[in-house]
Image (cartoon, rainbow, N blue to C red):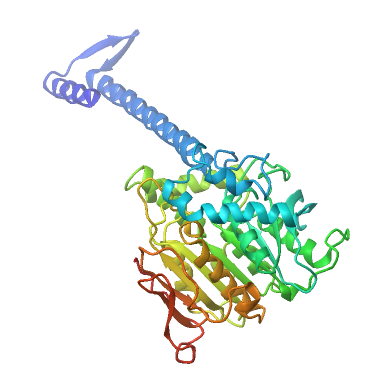
Amino acid sequence: LPCARQARIAAMSASATPRAYTQLGGQKTLADAVSGKMKTCGMICLGLLVLISFGMQCCIYNMIALRFVEVHHKWAAEMTLDPSTALNYYTEKNRDHRFCDRQIESFGLTAEAAGKWFKEKGWRDLKFKSRAAEGVMQIDITAYYFAAGADSPTVVVQHGNNCNNRDNTVITAAFFLHSMGFNVITPNLRNHGDSGKTGRITWGQEEAYDTLGAWDYVVTDPEGKIGFAQRPEKTVLMGFSMGGLISRVAFALEPRIPALFTDSAHWNARNVLEWSINQEYPGLGRFFLPSAWFWAEHITGHDLDRLIPEKLFQREGDRRLLANIHATNDDIVPIQQSQDFIAYIKDTDFRVLQEWYEKLYGDDCEIHCRVHLQYPEKYKFFLCSFFSEVFDRTPEACGFGEGTSTLRFPTGIESTLRLTGEMIQQTSNGSLQRLVPAASTPSYVGARLREA
């Protein structure tokens, strides 16, 4: 602006007093000199714009894109833990475990029971290769295996972003499922736990083949360490958060997997990134997202939109079974992700047997992937109900006894569950009550997301 103001003054002077002057030994009019100054100012302004743009891209690269795909251990359970000690670690109050007192109170007995269960029953340490795929490095994957027997179905339980298979999510699911008579395998994704390293998170482009590597290992038992090769139709997936997204991709890539259970899962990573940007830089998500996504793809070396559920899930002809859980006030993966998931699925042939959307208590309590902490018994029954339907088992096989009216869980928050075509509601005394007879409700129930 100062340059432009000087140029206007000089131009007026030149038109009022047409004279010549000498500069560097050459004759030029004052108008020529003004034109030169304006060109110089233009170059300076262009240079400043380039510097500002470069600085902005550096900020987007380092503060958004790099963080989106970085590998770190800030959220991970300590590798010194094992299935018998992991949950007790989380419920010790003097640890930096990000559990609040209310979660410890509601979950403490479950954590204690899980520790005793795994100490008595034990587990196996496995190591195998991820599934081979073009353009994806095949890598060593480690896992825990909890054996229930050759007659029992198997559930592959996948942890989320930058944690490991000692995390409270997968250990709790493994405890519930194993105690109900299921075989369970909990693999560490690449760059997580003690699996192989590549140095970047690819949001399913590579990690889906780690989950499929675990599934392949279970259905082939190539080294005889499990003791039997499980039938594909008896081997299903379950995933938390980013592990839910990865499980959705794996589920779509492998049509022999009969069912998928997701908890607090991403449906579209690009949309979550935009939402996250808006949380940190309000209103700037749609402006920063194109550059952030470009740099994330540059860092990972992948088209991050190639393997995504909405491209891979077939619209017609696939009638496999799904279940989904999400806290309506989730502050890491917003409930919109489940809304988008249901909006897509309702126009397909997939069958959603169960949905559970609940507002969890906040305050100093973390919300993401915490439904099992607030309602452990209800969560266990939800697992039992879904997988019993998938494998044609009865709830009695889970150890719940006949009917659902005896199931109790913490009171205080009223919620509605959708269980295999039935509406089951928490009553004032904490028991479950059937609201609609199963025969009058279709097998798929639409996406009515509600907060308690």
Say which residue appears at 69% left-offset and 72% top-offset.
257
Counting from the top left corner in percent of width and height, residue 323 is at: 54, 71
Counting from the top left corner in percent of width and height, residue 345 is at: 50, 75
Indicate left or right for 60 with 414 as reference. right
For this rendering, which residue is in front, 292 or 348? 348
Q: Is residue 376 visible?
A: yes
Vertical comparison of 110 with 284: above or below: below
Indicate left or right for 256 with 42 as reference. right
Q: Quadrant of the N terminus?
A: top left
- Residue sitting at the far left: 16
Vertical comparison of 447 with 338: above or below: below
For this rendering, which residue is in front, 233 or 435? 435
Say which residue appears at 54% left-offset and 67% top-offset.
310
For this rendering, which residue is in front, 360 or 39? 360
Counting from the top left corner in percent of width and height, residue 130 is at: 75, 55
Indicate left or right for 71 with 347 as reference. right
For this rendering, which residue is in front, 84 or 13? 84
Vertical comparison of 312 with 5: above or below: below
Q: Quadrant of the C terminus?
A: bottom left
Q: How many marks?
A: 0
- Residue sitting at the far right: 223
- Residue sitting at the far top: 25
Say which residue appears at 72% left-offset and 43% top-offset.
194
Counting from the top left corner in percent of width and height, residue 187 is at: 70, 54
Q: Is residue 69 visible?
A: no
